[in-house]
Image (cartoon, grey):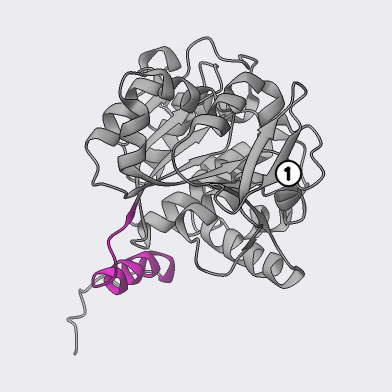
Amino acid sequence: MIFPLSYPIMPPHAILPLLFLALSASAAPPTPIIFDTDMGNDIDDALALAVIHALESRGEAKLIAVTITKDNRWSAPFVDLVNHFYHRPDIPIGVVRNGKTPQDAPYTRIPCERKTPDGKPLYPRRIQDGSQAPEAAGLIKSILEKQPGHSVVIAQVGFSTNLARLLDLPGAADLVRRKVKLLSIMAGQFPSGKPEYNVHTDVESARKLFSSWPTAIVFSGFEIGLSIPYPAQAIENDFRWVPNHPIVDAYRAYKPMPYDRPTWDLTAALYALRPDSGYFSLSAPGSVTVDDEGRTTLQPSPNGRHRYLTATPEQRAKTLEALTELSSQPRIP
């Protein structure tokens, strides 16, 4: 086919996401995902959100809500501006009330405060302050009520506060049983059982969640993300398709560059949406228990609903390649 000379030539970075959409048109429907995050405490949450947006652009995912377990005013605005950046401004966002970590977080605040030369926000958003967002547990329940049965995956990459509070709502446990097919969670450390931050910060919620959640839970333990560091070189080189990128701004605001950072939350998000792609293997089934210090132990049981991820050196290399490619993937124009 010969196009007229006036036909606009799209750059390769703009064509690529459109090709993903075309190729996925006849594939399986996208997996609905709820992303529950303590956005602001560590930079891996931001990169995990970018991975989810890339998988939505490829037709593999549908981000139906983001809920936040960090009780800071900038967490929801940052999530909102990232969603706007990827041209998905209407994704519901919920926030924890009376959460465990209200401390300031430069990596969420600084991108929110950036301005254009004429004084407008560099990254548009609709939420200006976290107080404008609804409470998270109630939002999750209302979102699940609208989804097909056994279709939703949840990636929890922060504290268990929101999901534990969800289980306290009338009828929520049965709703979860009917609507959710997998909870992929960044929590614990296996098999050592050393205390891990997400569990230790809200031990009671973690204990309630692990004992009462009615579907399968797969844990991406501390050791998995630690063994797959995200390279600073990828931040410097792979996001150049746009002059200003909120994920890059956040990464640079988190710590002085250059630094590599473990992919804790990215691995949980990746497994949630690509569980059968060979990035990881699984432990034997069992039940995870939590002690008062936040140490996690998997008690083996053939009927247990809990497993944790493992990874060979070859799998770690494959996973890192996927995570760096997805997190920096250009948005759909």
Q: Main secondary structure of the magenta part?
A: helix
Q: Amino acid type of disc 1? A: Phe
Q: Count neighbours of disc 1 (C-alpha within 10 A) and say few if under 14, some if 14 to 19, many if 20 or more.
A: many
**Splitting the image into 4 quarters, where does residue 333 fall?**
bottom left
Image: 315 above or below 165: below
The image position of residue 36, as x and y in percent, is: 48, 34
Span colored in magenta: 12-31
> What element does badge 1 sit on?
helix
Q: Position of residue 262 (x, y in %)?
A: 72, 48
Residue at x 49%, y 52% (from the top left corner): 272
Query: Does the magenta-highlighted stretch encompass residue 7?
Result: no
Residue at the location (69% across, 43% down)? 299
Q: Is residue 8 visible?
A: yes
**Image quarter hosting the N terminus:** bottom left
Counting labels gives 1
* Whether residue 94 is situated above or below residue 273 in the rendered picture: above
Q: Nearer the viewer, residue 208 or 259?
A: 208
Quadrant for residue 56, please give it.
bottom left
Residue at image coords 56%, 63%: 325
Residue 155 x, y percent position in the rendering = 49, 43
Where does label 1 land, which residue? 222
Extreme residue toward the front, this view: 302
Q: Residue 282: x, y in percent?
A: 63, 60
